[in-house]
């Protein structure tokens, strides 16, 4: 089974900062990689699929990149609404594993 | 706009069984795979199982094999998760999510329900 590892687990940042989260797969997932945002008490929300395609309605400050086994989620200018936990997930076949999450908190 | 609503969670004792349901409104699910995802309180997301659009294939995470069964009824626009022999460590919020669209754009879990809480305790 493919395992996903995210880093860092917690990230302290200020409004306006550029933020980068890394996700590594234990073997290639090709381009079947998604990112989700989850706020406390809410269900996750799909942000990006197929590595870099923004879901409808997602602000353009979010971007994704990478290929194979290494991927990144970048928030170009952190906004107050972006403080949340972010998860990567592969969907190259099944089981479809998630990373352990990265909590973006206010510095 | 499609919405997913889960039900069937609750407080149960170890060893008991539950059947979780997920019903869709606003759109049909019959061209979509469906997944269940769970989240232990204060912890991360854990993918549990998926079922193909026609119910022909089911895949489970390792710790779910043998105790969990995912199924669907496209006529009722519904997906189910049967959990037998519940354990304390199965305590979690269980979400259903719309998965792969057959002949679609390759999106991931694009629609989620609000979750149903399963608590296993004696």
Image: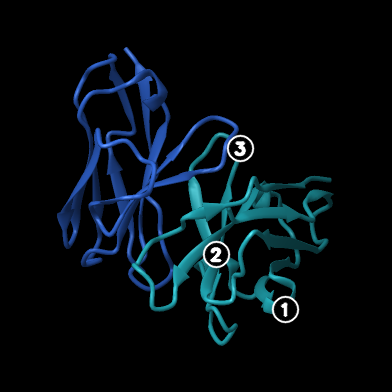
The chain letter under disc 1 is B
1 or 3: tag closer to the N-terminus: 3
Q: Could you tell me how far apart the alpha carbons at marks 2 and 3 are, in whole angstroms?
A: 20 Å
Judged by depth in the image, the label closer to the viewer, 1 or 3, is: 1
In the rendering, at what x and y percent does residue B65 appear? 58, 73
Write down the quadrant of residue B66 in the picture.
bottom right
Judged by depth in the image, the label closer to the viewer, 2 or 3, is: 2
Give the SS element for disc 3: loop
In the rendering, at what x and y percent does residue B1 appear? 58, 53
Q: Chain A takes which shade in the image?
A: blue
Write down the quadrant of residue A85 in the picture.
top left
> Disc number at residue B35?
2
Q: Chain B takes which shade in the image?
A: cyan
> Disc number at residue B41?
3
Q: Which residue is mark 1?
A: B75
Say which residue appears at 51% left-offset and 68% top-offset: B62
């Amino acid at each position: 089974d493919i395992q996903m590892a995210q880093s860092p687990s917690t990230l302290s940042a200020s409004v306006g900062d550029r933020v980068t989260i890394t996700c590594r797969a234990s073997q290639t997932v090709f381009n079947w990689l998604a990112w989700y945002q989850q706020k406390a008490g809410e269900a996750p929300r799909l942000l990006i699929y197929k590595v870099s395609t923004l879901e409808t309605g997602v602000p353009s400050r979010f971007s994704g990149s990478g290929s194979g086994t290494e991927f990144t989620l970048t928030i170009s200018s952190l906004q107050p609404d972006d403080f949340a936990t972010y998860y990567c997930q592969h969907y190259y076949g099944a089981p479809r594993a998630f990373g352990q999450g990265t909590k973006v908190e206010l510095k | 706009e499609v919405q997913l609503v889960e039900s069937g969670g609750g407080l149960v004792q170890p060893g008991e069984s539950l059947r979780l349901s997920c019903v869709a409104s606003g759109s049909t699910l019959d061209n979509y795979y469906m997944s269940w995802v769970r989240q232990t309180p204060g912890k991360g997301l854990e993918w549990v199982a998926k079922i193909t659009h026609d119910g022909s294939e089911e895949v489970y995470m390792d710790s779910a094999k043998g105790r969990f069964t995912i199924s669907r009824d496209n006529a009722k626009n519904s997906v189910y998760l049967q959990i037998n022999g519940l354990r304390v460590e199965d305590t979690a919020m269980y979400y259903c999510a719309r998965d792969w669209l057959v002949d679609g754009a390759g999106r991931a879990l694009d629609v989620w329900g609000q979750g149903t809480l399963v608590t296993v305790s004696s």
